Image: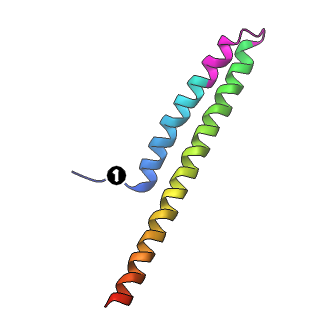
Amino acid sequence: MRRIGTIPATIIVATWVFIIGFTFGYLGRLDSGTAPATDGAALAGLLSGAAAVAIAGAMLIAFRLVRTAARAARSRDAKHAG
């Protein structure tokens, strides 16, 4: 089985997260019952999608930092043990 690279996988996940965030933001605004619902709904959808992508990006960065710190700690322990 071939492995997908980090960048393409991140783009795929960000796209899906944006679509889901946009859908929930758009539908939530339409359900609120305001008069110019479609204009506000599109903006709410875009903001929700962008926020979802930003949160996913922050989680990716946090995951990378923790993994790098753990790898450095293991490397440091291996140097002192041997």
- Nearest the viewer among 37 and 33 is 33
- Nearest the viewer among 12 and 24 is 24
Is 55 a magenta residue?
no
- Nearest the viewer among 78 and 30 is 78
Expressed as whole percent of the image width and height from the top left, the position of residue 57 reads 56, 49
Q: In percent of the image, x 59 and y 28: which residue is there?
A: 22
Q: Quadrant of residue 26?
A: top right
Against 26, residue 11 (above or below) is below
Q: Could you tell whether 80 is left or right of 14 in the image?
A: left
How busy is the neighbourhood of tag 1: few (under 14 within 10 Å), some, or many (20 plus)? Answer: few
Expressed as whole percent of the image width and height from the top left, the position of residue 16 reads 48, 35
Magenta part of the protein: which range? 25-36
The amino acid beneath tag 1 is Ile
Q: Residue furthest toward the left?
A: 1
What residue did someone put label 1 on? Answer: 4
Q: In percent of the image, x 55 and y 35: which residue is there?
A: 18
Q: In percent of the image, x 69 and y 26: which residue is there?
A: 44
Q: Residue furthest toward the right?
A: 35
Against 39, residue 66 (above or below) is below
Against 49, residue 23 (above or below) is above
Expressed as whole percent of the image width and height from the top left, the position of residue 43 reads 71, 26
